[in-house]
């Protein structure tokens, strides 16, 4: 009787192991990026790098201009939200360019995709500027909360901007 119980447990343990291996294998297959050619990956990376440049241009304009003055807190909040959203978008495109470049074995493409990471510094400078502008507009501003929001929203935005397979 005890022997039959032990054999039953061993068989069910093997079955559980087999099921676990199959589930993990299926998940790994789904998580793997689609195989694509270098030219396809380059087109995808170029799209994200173009978007990075466009957003960085908008941020650069704000960084070089004097702080705008607002007549209400609602106007200030709208301005702040739009600029933080630009930082999120910038970082999402930078990250997605890198994801696309890693999908193929092309060192030049990977270097090109990594280059805009220097522009993430623009986001840091913008948060510092927003803090100064908030003070000039007698508005509250919590840079730590802003960075937490950015870190939380980048993956979601990255999923939104990813090109379809």
Image (cartoon, helix red, strand yellow):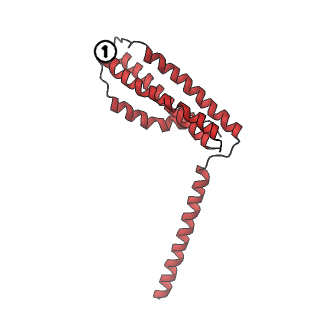
Residue 66 quadrant = top left
Q: 18 or 151, which lies in front?
A: 151
Task: Tell me where residue 55 appears, x and y as whole percent.
Answer: 52, 24
What residue do we see at 34% from left, 32% from top? 145
- From the image, tell me which residue sits under label 1: 136
Which quadrant holds residue 143? top left
Q: In this view, does 155 lie to the left or right of 49?
A: left
- For the C terminus, which image quadrant? top right
Q: Which of 46 and 68 is in front in this view?
A: 46
Residue at point 64% right, 37% down?
108
Q: Where is residue 29 in the image (x, y as percent from the top left)?
A: 62, 54
Query: x%, y% of residue 102?
Result: 60, 43
User: Above or below — where is 104 with respect to 69?
Assistant: below
The foreground one among 113 and 30 is 113
Q: In this view, does 155 lie above or below 3?
A: above
Query: What element does badge 1 sit on?
Result: helix
Mark 1 neighbour density, 10 Å: few (under 14) some (14–19) many (20 or more)? few
Image coords of residue 21 (percent x, y) = 56, 64
Q: Quadrant of residue 20?
A: bottom right
């Amino acid at each position: 009787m005890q022997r039959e119980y032990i054999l039953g447990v061993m068989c069910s343990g093997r079955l559980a192991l087999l099921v676990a291996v199959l589930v993990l294998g299926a998940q790994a297959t789904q998580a793997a990026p689609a195989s694509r050619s270098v030219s396809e990956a380059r087109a995808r990376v170029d799209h994200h790098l173009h978007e990075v440049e466009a957003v960085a241009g908008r941020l650069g304009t704000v960084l070089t201009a004097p702080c705008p003055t607002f007549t209400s807190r609602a106007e200030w909040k709208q301005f702040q939200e739009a600029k933080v959203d630009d930082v999120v978008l910038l970082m999402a495109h930078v990250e997605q360019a890198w994801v696309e470049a890693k999908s193929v074995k092309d060192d030049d493409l990977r270097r090109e995709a990594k280059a805009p990471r220097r522009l993430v510094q623009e986001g840091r400078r913008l948060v510092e500027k927003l803090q100064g502008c908030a003070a000039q507009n007698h508005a509250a501003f919590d840079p730590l909360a802003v960075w937490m929001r950015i870190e939380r929203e980048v993956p979601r935005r990255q999923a939104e901007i990813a090109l379809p397979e």
